């Protein structure tokens, strides 16, 4: 029996020792110069990682808090919203938009399929919208939506584009170049920091709109964030340890470069996809739209397989959500994981498959990780 759990779910992820050590720091005044410096460092680092010169706000709370901060300030009471959805998190964006906007049209693609720019073009020709919402990396299905192409269509229509990039950091993403107005991300995915903070990057257009937002929330009021930001402060007591850790991690990524950070995830994902093929299991996401930060694999007894991997090998994978429960499992590619960890996943998977009466080629699957 292995000595430690191997957490391979698509977030929260395994945090490296150096990050854990940084987080064990003593607390300091969030209204003093040290925090002001950290706030600048983290905001600039997040902006850099998202490819934007826009304004980044740090919101204490998980990714959903950042999404709510974006929507409450940029979907106004009279707004018509087009919510693009092909999974659980696209549905969440739509459910949220229904609270804040006037009329919401939900464009749905089946789980596992990518949303095409052509789909969006047709939708935008058939209706007039003020805001469009979309998930970049749909973690429930491991689908990467082509935001670059989608953003082109949205821009032509004049609507504002809000993108959930909670789990897509670690893949190529260029907010300004693509024309995205708001991007939201969080700590507990590819950054390899514990959960607790989310980040919302606003383009100039989004800022102008947010300034005119009616006040509908105390905690998420854009005007309050801007006012405090000018003083180098957070509006409320922040999660200081997660901020320290994020500053540290962004410093490390800056040293090696964004390309190296992204290529780490694409190499891991390519190896997992190859290993899945070798072990004889199909991938769930449509080819050409596959995520690099996680992989969804089909198996009709996925819950039995996950349970066996957990109890016998202490390997933890993500399950299917909503109607995909019992049909897929998901392997996260983010955080402090090594080649040996991936090998351990596939050894455990091979064993579980054998337990289910199958005859997997585990040895060939393991070879896929030689590239890591
Ligand atoms: C794509 C996506 N959006 C939103 C969320 C919600 O984030 P949180 O659970 O941090 O609120 C997640 C979490 O897994 C996610 O993967």
Image: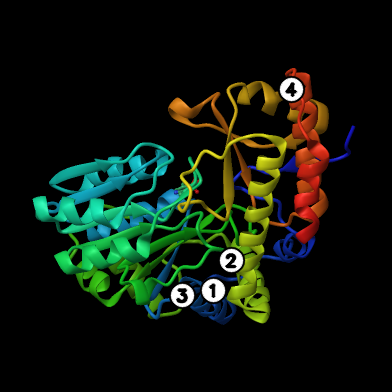
Per the image, label 1 sits on a secondary structure element best described as helix
Q: Which residue extends farthest top?
A: 357
Tell me the distance, in whole angstroms, between the alpha carbons under discs 4 and 2.
46 Å
Per the image, label 4 sits on a secondary structure element best described as loop
User: Residue 371 versus residue 178: which sits nearer the camera?
Assistant: 371
Q: Which residue is denoted by mark 1 in the rendering?
A: 42
Left/right placement of residue 150 relative to residue 65 reads left
Give the mark nearest the N terminus, 3 or 4: 3
Tell me the distance, in whole angstroms, between the alpha carbons under discs 3 and 4.
47 Å
Q: Which residue is denoted by mark 4 in the rendering?
A: 358
Give the mark nearest the N terminus, 1 or 4: 1
Q: Nearer the viewer, mark 3 or mark 4?
A: 4
Relative to 26, does residue 269 appear above or below in the rendering? above
Q: Which mark is residue 243?
A: 2
User: Residue 4 versus residue 61: which sits nearer the camera?
Assistant: 4
Image spot of residue 347 (x, y percent): 81, 37
Q: Which mark is residue 88?
A: none
User: Residue 274 versus residue 70: which sits nearer the camera?
Assistant: 274
Q: Which residue is denoted by mark 3 in the rendering?
A: 47
User: Residue 93 versus residue 228: which sits nearer the camera?
Assistant: 93
């Amino acid at each position: 029996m292995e000595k430690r759990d191997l957490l391979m779910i698509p977030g929260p992820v395994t945090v490296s020792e150096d990050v854990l050590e940084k987080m064990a720091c003593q607390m300091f005044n969030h209204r003093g110069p040290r925090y002001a410096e950290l706030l600048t460092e983290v905001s600039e680092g997040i902006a850099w990682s998202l490819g934007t010169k826009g304004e980044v706000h740090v919101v204490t709370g998980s990714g959903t808090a950042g999404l709510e901060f974006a929507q409450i300030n940029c979907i106004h009471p009279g707004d018509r919203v087009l919510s693009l959805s092909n999974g659980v998190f696209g549905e969440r964006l739509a459910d949220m938009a229904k609270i804040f906007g006037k009329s919401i049209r939900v464009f749905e693609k089946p789980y596992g399929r990518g949303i095409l720019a052509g789909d969006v073009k047709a939708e935008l020709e058939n209706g007039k919208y003020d805001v469009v919402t979309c998930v970049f990396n749909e973690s429930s299905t491991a689908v990467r939506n082509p935001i670059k192409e989608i953003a082109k269509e949205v821009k032509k229509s004049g609507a504002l584009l809000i993108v959930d990039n909670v789990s897509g950091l670690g893949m190529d993403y260029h907010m300004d170049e693509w024309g995205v107005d708001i991007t939201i991300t969080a700590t507990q995915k590819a950054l390899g920091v514990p959960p607790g903070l989310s980040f919302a990057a606003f383009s100039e257009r989004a800022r102008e709109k947010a300034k005119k937002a009616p006040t509908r929330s105390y905690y998420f009021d854009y005007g309050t964030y801007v006012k405090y930001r000018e003083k180098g402060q957070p509006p409320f007591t922040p999660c200081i340890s997660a901020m320290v850790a994020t500053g540290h991690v962004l410093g490390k990524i800056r040293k090696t470069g964004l390309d190296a950070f992204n290529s780490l995830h694409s190499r891991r994902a390519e190896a997992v996809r190859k290993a899945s093929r070798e072990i004889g299991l199909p991938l769930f996401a449509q080819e050409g739209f596959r995520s690099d930060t996680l992989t969804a694999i089909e198996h009709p007894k996925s819950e039995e397989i996950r349970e066996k991997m957990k109890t016998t090998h202490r390997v933890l994978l993500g399950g299917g959500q909503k109607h995909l429960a019992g049909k897929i499992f998901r392997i996260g590619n983010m955080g402090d994981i090594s080649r040996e960890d991936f090998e351990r996943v596939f050894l455990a998977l091979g064993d579980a498959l054998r337990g289910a009466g199958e005859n997997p080629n585990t040895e060939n699957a393991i070879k896929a990780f030689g590239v890591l």
